[in-house]
Amino acid sequence: MANVRYYSEFRTLKGDFYLIEIYDSTFTGDESRVYTDSSGFTLTHDGETDQVFSPIIGSSVQFNVYNQDSAFDTFLNDILTQQDKRFFVKIYRSKHEATDDLNAFYNTTKVVKDGLVMFSTPYEEMTKYYDFFWCGYVVQDLIEEADESKPRLVSLKASDGISLLSTLDYNFEFAQSFQKTIKDVLIDIFEKTSVDDLFSGDQYILTSVVNYYADEHTYSATTDPIDATKFDLKAFTAYEHNAERSYTTALDVIREICLALQCRFYFDNGSFRLEQLTERSNATIREFRYTKDGSLYQTESSVDLDVSVDQNNVYRSQGAFRYLPAIKKVTLTQEKKNAFSLIRGVVTFPEDEIDTGVISSSNNARVILNMRTRFQTFISTSLTGVSTPVFAVTLRLEPTDGTANQYHQNTLISGVTTFSQPFWSTSVGTTKFAANAVSRQTSSTTMSVRSLSTAPIPKDGELFIDITILGFYDAQGSSTSFFSGGNSFNWAVDLNSAKYENDNDPSSYTQAIFSASNASTSLGSAITQDLGETRIGDGPATTATLYAYNGSAYVESTGWRVANSGSYIDIAKLTTKDVLSLQNSVVKRFEGTTIQGHDFSSRLDFDSAKWIQLRGTYTANTDEYQGEWFKIAQSYTDINEDTPVDVVDSATDTSIPDPSGMYANIASGAVAGMDIDEQNESIGPFEQTSTGGEINGSLNVTGASTLQTTSVREFTMTERVNVTINDVSANPGGSETISLRDHMNFISYSGANGTYTINLPSSEDGVILRFKTDDTISNSKSITLQPQSGERIDAESTYDMDRAYDGITLLGKNSNWFIIQKKEK
C-alpha cells in the first residue's frame, strides 16, 4: 500500500484550499510537508486534434516545491533512479459551502512570504475537508532543479493515467469471458494497467455520459448503455510467430470505443470521463459513476455543469475570438469481418490448442486454413514400400448460445487420400488430410502444402484449432509403421494462415468507410475530418460486433439512436452524423483567460452562448484558466448520411469453389492433382522464375498453342511443323520491304519483263529468312534482294534470283547477311 511521503497545501486567491500529496509505494515513514511556489500547481489538458471532436484528451500537473534539506535530496534521487510507477501524485480540493468558516481548521495568521497558508491540524484529520480532484504518475525525465543554494525550487510533473495507457498492451485474461461490456472493458483496463491503484475503494474512477441506445436495448433512463453493451475482446489481439499473441494498447482500445460512440475520454474533477460530446448541448446531463471494482457508485440524472461568466464572480479577460471552418464531410472507417485473418504470423504444431476468437456464422461463413507439413524420417532398418502420413485438424466451435460444441470433420472413403465432403457435427471428430508419401527404405525430409476449407459455420461461436498426426498408411489404406528396427521420425505442421470469410459482396472487402456530408450550398470548402479506424460496430460484418442486452440476452445490434427518439441507424452513421452536427457551420472559438471558477468539464455561459473547452492550463493559486473554448451549437441542417463505401483489400486471397462446393485458397493445396509448393513457387512441374517460368519435366500440349518471343533449349518434334508463308507478288519495277517476322517468303511474278526488288530488314544475329520462287521467275523476270545501307549478302551489295524454282536461306550475323543454303535449278 502506497504511503504519503510529502504533502503541501495552499489557499487560492479565491479562498479554496488545495492539498497535494506525493505517494511512494515503498515508503514506510511519516509524511513531511513541503511548500509550493506562488502558482500552487498548473493543470493542463490537451487533445489529439485541433477539431471540435478529439477522442482522447490527456492531462498533466506541474508544481514547484522548495528543496530545503538532505531528506528531499534523497527523495529526488529515489525518483530519478526508480523508473516505474512507484511515485504518484494526488490532489484534493476543499469541500465546503460558501457559508462555511474554513478558518476553524486552518491557521491563517501564519502566512509566509510566498503566500502559502500553514496547516495547523493533524495530517490525518486533513482529508476530511477535501474532495478528490486529480491524480497522476510522476514523470522522471521532466524534473528540473534550480542551480542555486537551498532552499531552491524543484519542478515536478505528473501525468494522468491516460499517458500510461498508451505504453501498455491490454492483455486481458483468457480465463474470463471474451465478451465484456464497454464499462467492464474500461474497468478491466484500469486494473490491468494498475491505474486503479491511484484510487481508493470509496472513490469513483469512471464517469459515463453516454446516451446511445440500440434497437435491441430496452430503453430506460436508469440504464447506462455502456453497461448493457458488449463486444468481443479478441478483436484486439492476434497470434504472432510461435503462437505468441500480440495485443492492442489499452489507450487504442479506449480510442476505438470513443470513435464508435462519439465520445471524449479525459480526466477531470476526480475521475476518468467517457463523455459523448453532443450530450453537452443539453442544459443538464446524466452521469453514471463507477468505483474501481465496477460497482455503480451513484447515478446523477440531472447534472448541471454550466458556469456563468458574469464578470462579477467569474471573469474572462485577455481573450480573442477566432473561428473554426465548417466541415464538408466526417468519415469513420470500420473494420469488417467477412474476410480477415484469425492469426497473424505462423503457428507451428505440435502446439497447445489455440483459441482464435468468436466468429460469426452469417452469410455462409467459413474458415480457410493454409498449412505446410514437414516430415523427417530416420531409417536404420530398411522397410519396403512407401507410407503416407495422414494429419488430423481439430476445429472445435463453442456456440455463443450455450448449445453443444460443434466439430468439423470428414470420413475416409478409400485409400488414404480420398475423404468425404466435410461437415459439422456435435459428435467429436477431426478433419483429416494426407501429406505426400515418404519412403520407408531411406531417410528423407518431405514437405507438403495443403489447404482446408470448412463447411459453412453452423452457429456463432468461439473457434479452437489443434493439429496432430493421425497415422501412416499404404496405398491400400492399411496402417504402416516406422517404429521397427530403430526407425524414427519427426513431424511439424506450420499453420501459415487461418482466414475467416463469408459471402458478403465483394467477398474480399475488409473495411467500410462511413461518412456524413454537409450539403449546404453556402459551403465553399471541402474540409474532411477523418475520425480514424475502429473495429467496433454493428452487425455480424464487423470485427468487434456490438451486442446489446435486450432484457434476457445479449444479441447483435442492428441500429442506434439518441435516447428513445428518432430512427435507428448504424452506429457508425450516427457517430459521423453527430460529429458533423457540431461543426456543420463556422464555429466560433474563444481563446483567452477565465478567472475564479470552473473545471475542464464545465460548460461556460457568456455572450448568450454555451462554450465547451478544447484545451487549457489551469493555474490553481490564482484560479486562472488559459485555454480555448468552442461555441457548442448543434445543427443537423443539410446533413446527409452517406452510403458506406466498401474497401477491397488487394492482399486478400480470392477464393474459388472446389468440386465439392467448398472453398479453396489457391495459394496452397492442390490443383487437378498437382501439388502447390508455396515455398518454391511451383505448381506440379510449373515453377516461377525471375524472368517468367519454367517446366520441370515433359510437356504435352494437345491443343493449339501460340508462343510469343519464345526461347527453346532442347526441342524434339514428333509431329508436323507448320510455318507462316509471306506471299510476294512481284511485278516489273516494283518493290516491297519485308520484316524479320517474314521467315518464309514465296515469290511469284506477273506482267512484262523487268526486276522486282525485295528490301531486306536490318540484320540481327540469329535471324533466318528464306526465299523460294515459282516457275514465273526467269532471267528476264527477276528478283533482287536488297540489304539495308551498309549491309552485305556474302560480301555482295545485292543478290539476284532469276531462275524458276530458285531457293535461298539467309542468316543474320554481325550486321550482315550470310547465305547458309542455296538451290538453283
Image (cartoon, rainbow, N blue to C red):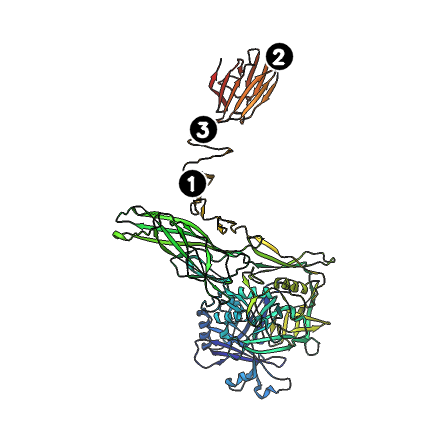
Image quadrant in which you'd find residue 761: top right
Residue 714 in the image, given as x and y percentages of width and height: 41, 31
Nearer to me, 550 or 53: 550
Image quadrant in which you'd find residue 555: bottom right
Q: Which mark is residue 685?
A: 1
Q: Which mark is residue 719?
A: 3
Residue density around tag 2, few if under 14, some if 14–19, many if 20 or more, within 10 Å: few
Image quadrant in which you'd find residue 409: bottom left
Residue visible at 63% across and 77% down? Answer: 301
Of the residues shown, which amino acid type is indicated by label 2?
Answer: Ala
Residue sitting at the far front: 413
Residue visible at 44% across and 69% down? Answer: 81
CA gap between label 2 and label 1 equals 60 Å
Question: Is label 2 in contact with label 3 (beta carbons under 8 Å)?
Answer: no
Residue sitting at the far bottom: 104
Q: Which residue is mark 2?
A: 752
Q: Secondary structure at mark 2?
A: loop
Badge nearest the viewer, 3 or 1: 3
Of the residues shown, which amino acid type is indicated by label 1?
Answer: Pro
CA gap between label 3 and label 1 equals 23 Å
Q: Earlier along the polypeptide chain: callout 2 or callout 3?
A: 3
